[in-house]
Each structure stands twice: as structure tokens, then as C-alpha cells.
Amino acid sequence: MNLMKINEIRTVDLGRTACFIMALLLLMASHAHTSVDSPYQSPARPFGLEIVDTVKLAGSDDASSDFQNNYLPTMSGWGNMELTAPSFTDLTSTIALDPSKISLATQYDTRVYFIGENTNYKNTLGFNTSGGGITEGDPLLIFPDASTANKRKKQTPLLSGDFVDLGTIESGSGLDFFLIADGARGGTDVFSTQTSSNPDGLEHALVFARPDSPYLFIAFEDLYGETNGDYKDLLVAVDIGRANVGALTNMPEPSTLFILSSFIGLVVYRKYRMDSIEDTAGSS
């Protein structure tokens, strides 16, 4: 076999090897960005409502990994604090929002993360973009059984950081979240972030936001009449994006602040230059 033929074979082999490595890298990259379904999906469907999507495993894609590492520990700590205390917002650098006025200023692929629960109930979480509670609009379930324990199993299917994608929520849409108290075991009391929709006429959700994050922190009370009132029965984080958090808290995004500060700096510079030119002209 002559040298030219050998070089041709080597070139072909190298090309095939390169293609194989490239395909392997693309496969690995695609898996790194793909969320993974939880092995336990609750069959509970209180009131016959459908789920918006399946529950995904904590940390199974890039966004959830970022939440798991950089936000979940802090928010889990908030669950150990007195959420109704006036000092809570000062200690956590959050802003308390009106639960009945959650809306999106810009379109966003919204996601809800499970943080924890502290109740004997097996509560259900859902949402509605066209009304409050489940008697109007388009209610869908997020976590049919928001129960957790030290180990994931059929009876306690969630772990902290598990999430559900709500899909793309259009700009201008309201966003109501509702809790069905003990819904996974047939409970029928529905408590909404829209207080007017609640059977006892009381507020059953607290909502907080940190202007430097894309998340809302929502804490629910699951007892009729709020005989306990600690708002720790279900804790979730909702990723609505920094722009929407900024709109709700009246704080612009960092990029907007940069543009604004640059504009102000330019105005100050031009004013300084004009004053310098006038002073020079006046002294000549």
C-alpha cells in the first residue's frame, strides 16, 4: 500500500473520529440542558383539574441548577423566619407585594419551584391566568400533591427544588395561584391569592420579591379562618423574570440602570464641556 493511500485512510479515520466526538459532545450538551421528569408523578386531580405539565427533578437543567445553588438555600431559610413580622422584609431585603395584583408586564416562560411545606395536609397547588381560584378562568394544577419528606416516594413525591414549567405567560396577564387544602386527599377548601375568591374572605398567601432576582417567594396558609396563620403550609418560588419583578417592585432592571446612569453621565459631561468652553471664551 503506497503512502498516499495510507494518508487517505488516516484522513478518513480522523474525520470519522472528529464527527463522533462532535456528536458525543452535542449529545452531552443537549442532556445538560434538558429537564428530567420526576419518577413520582401524583395522580391526584382534585375537582377534575388537569396538570399544566409534569413535575421535573431539582437541578436537572441549567436554570434549575442555578436556582438550586444560588437561591434555594436562602429561600429555605426564609421558611424558618416569622413571615408576618414587619421586620421580615428588612432582614431579607425583600418587598411585600399585594398577592391579588401579580401580573406580567412582559411575556415570559414562567416556572414554579417547590421550596417546602409544614402541614399535615397533602395540599395541591394550581394557577389561573384568567380569574381567581377554580370557579372561573383557566385553572390548572402545578403540584397535585405538594408533600415532601426526607426521601422521595409515592406518598411524598416532592423534594426541595423540584419544579414545573407553566409555559409562556403573555404580557398583561394576571397570575393567580391557588391552594386546595388537602386536595390530594379530597379536600375542597380553595384559597387563592385573590382574597375576594376565598371562602372565608381572608388572605391566605403572602408574596415577597427581591428586586435583584427573577423570583417571587409565595407562602400559603391552608386553614379555613387562619386559626394558625403562620403562612408556612406551602412555600414556593415563581420565576417570572427580572423585568417583571422590576415592574412589580417599580425597580428597573440592571441593564436599564446602566443605560440611565450612562445617559446622566453623558449629560453631566456635556454640561461640564459647555461650561469650560464658555469660561475659555470669556477669558480670551
Image (cartoon, rainbow, N blue to C red):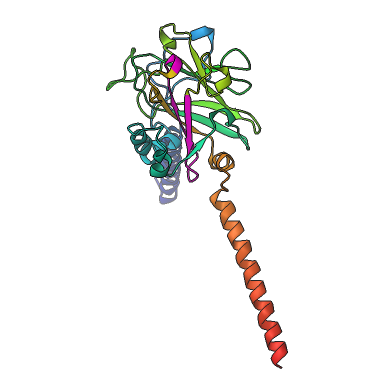
**In the image, residue 52 lies at what x, y percent?**
53, 19
Determine the residue positioned at 57% across, 39% down.
248
Is 33 included in the stretch rendered in magenta?
no
Residue 88 visible in image: yes
**In the image, residue 117 lies at what x, y percent?**
36, 23
Determine the residue positioned at 44% across, 21% down.
55
Farthest-out residue, bottom:
284
**In the image, residue 45 lies at what x, y percent?**
48, 9
Determine the residue positioned at 50% across, 44% down.
211
Farthest-out residue, left:
150
Residue 230 sits in which quadrant? Answer: top left
The answer to whether 137 appears left or right of 87 in the picture is: right
Image position of 9 with respect to 268: above or below: above
- For the N terminus, which image quadrant? top left
- For the C terminus, which image quadrant? bottom right
Image position of 105 with respect to 198: above or below: below
In the foreground, 198 or 250: 198
In the foreground, 267 or 230: 230
**In the image, residue 90 lies at what x, y percent?**
41, 44
Residue 144 visible in image: no
Image position of 249 with respect to 145: above or below: below
In the foreground, 34 or 63: 63
Is 219 included in the stretch rendered in magenta?
yes
Numbered circles on residues, count: 0
Which segment did they paint magenta? 205-225
